Amino acid sequence: MSAADTVLRTEGLTKSFGGVHAVDGATTEFYEGKINGLIGPNGSGKTTFFNCVTGMIRPDSGTVTMHGKDVTRWAPHKIARAGLGRSFQLCRVFPRMTVLENMLVAVQPRTLGEYLGNTRSTETVEKARAMLARVGIDHLEAAEARDISYGQQKLLELGSTLMTDPPFVMLDEPAGGVNPSLIERIALLVRELNDEGTTFLIVEHNMDLIMSLCDHIVVFDRGRPIATGTPDVVKSDPKVLEAYLGV
Ligand SMILES: Nc1ncnc2c1ncn2[C@@H]1O[C@H](COP(=O)(O)OP(=O)(O)OP(=O)(O)O)[C@@H](O)[C@H]1O
């Protein structure tokens, strides 16, 4: 694939914590219009990589290019404005707000009236309801977020991430702690959105999900990629087996 197809590129990305090289000179490419996956054994640096790319932590060195723009060390909100939506490994919702309110706070007020009145336009509320229906939790709109299941909270977080129509979405362990039927729903939604043009980068432990969903996979070990390619290519790479099984 050519540089024009690249949605995200890192070069020599490095982040250490004390003596631990969490991300160690990682040069990677992820592609526009694809469902990209990032996998690797525990502690291989996936979340640190994710956080460096999304601006949550500052890399020590290296560069991050998104949609052709150098976004290295940009603040998370600025990266979000440049078209990145993201979800968190540990689900982030506002527990005492209702499901619908959680969806609405994902969108900035668009008029002074909305801002001052702390209200949202009918159009925004309709969009929030439609998105809740899409992720399958519209029947829970009046419930407080803390009262719905963890899997439903993950769907809520995903729905709120999608409220701003980001062209590129990064998901950190969307299936973690989620029951199989909700995992299937997440997979279906990712596929549908991808068909509609949204690019994904998914960090995930659930190998079946990654292998069935992704077009392009990067495998991390000790803070850097050791294999890249289609699911079939990485599945049969001896370096990947070695990293996972320690053989
Ligand atoms: N804030 C931190 N302070 C110190 N060490 C850290 C910190 N964050 C990560 N590490 C270390 O960096 C390494 C990479 O961790 P990271 O969480 O990025 O890996 P991971 O591949 O996401 O792991 P997992 O699959 O278990 O979530 C690990 O050795 C971890 O202990």
Image (cartoon, rainbow, N blue to C red):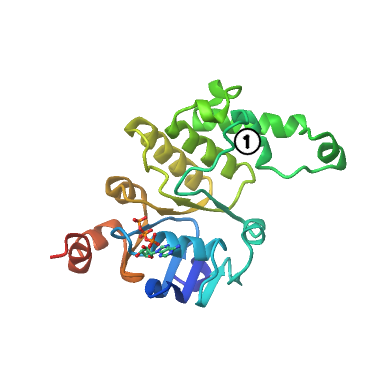
Query: In the rendered structure, which amino acid carries the disc numbered 1?
Result: Met
Residue 72 picture location, percent across and down: 58, 72
Which part of the image, by quadrant, shows the C terminus? bottom left
Residue at (74, 32) in percent of width and height:
123
Report the label total. 1
Residue 133 picture location, percent across and down: 55, 28
Residue 81 picture location, percent across and down: 67, 57
Residue at (36, 51) in percent of width and height:
204
Q: Is residue 60 above or below residue 81?
A: below
Q: Nearer the viewer, residue 203 or 169?
A: 203
Residue at (77, 42) in percent of width and height:
109
Quadrant assignment, res 176:
top left
Q: In this view, does 247 lie to the left or right of 148?
A: left
Disc 1, SS: helix
Q: Which of 189 and 62 is in front in this view?
A: 62
Q: Which of 240 and 190 is in front in this view?
A: 240
Asked whether mark 1 and ligand 1 are closer than 8 Å, the reply comes as: no
Residue at (65, 32) in percent of width and height:
101
Q: Quadrant of ligand 1?
A: bottom left
Circle 1 crowding by C-alpha within 10 Å: few under 14, some 14–19, many from 20: many
The residue at which mark 1 appears reads as 103
Q: Which of 190 and 149 is in front in this view?
A: 149
Quadrant assignment, res 49:
bottom left
Which part of the image, by quadrant, shows the N terminus? bottom left
Q: Which residue sits furthest left?
A: 247
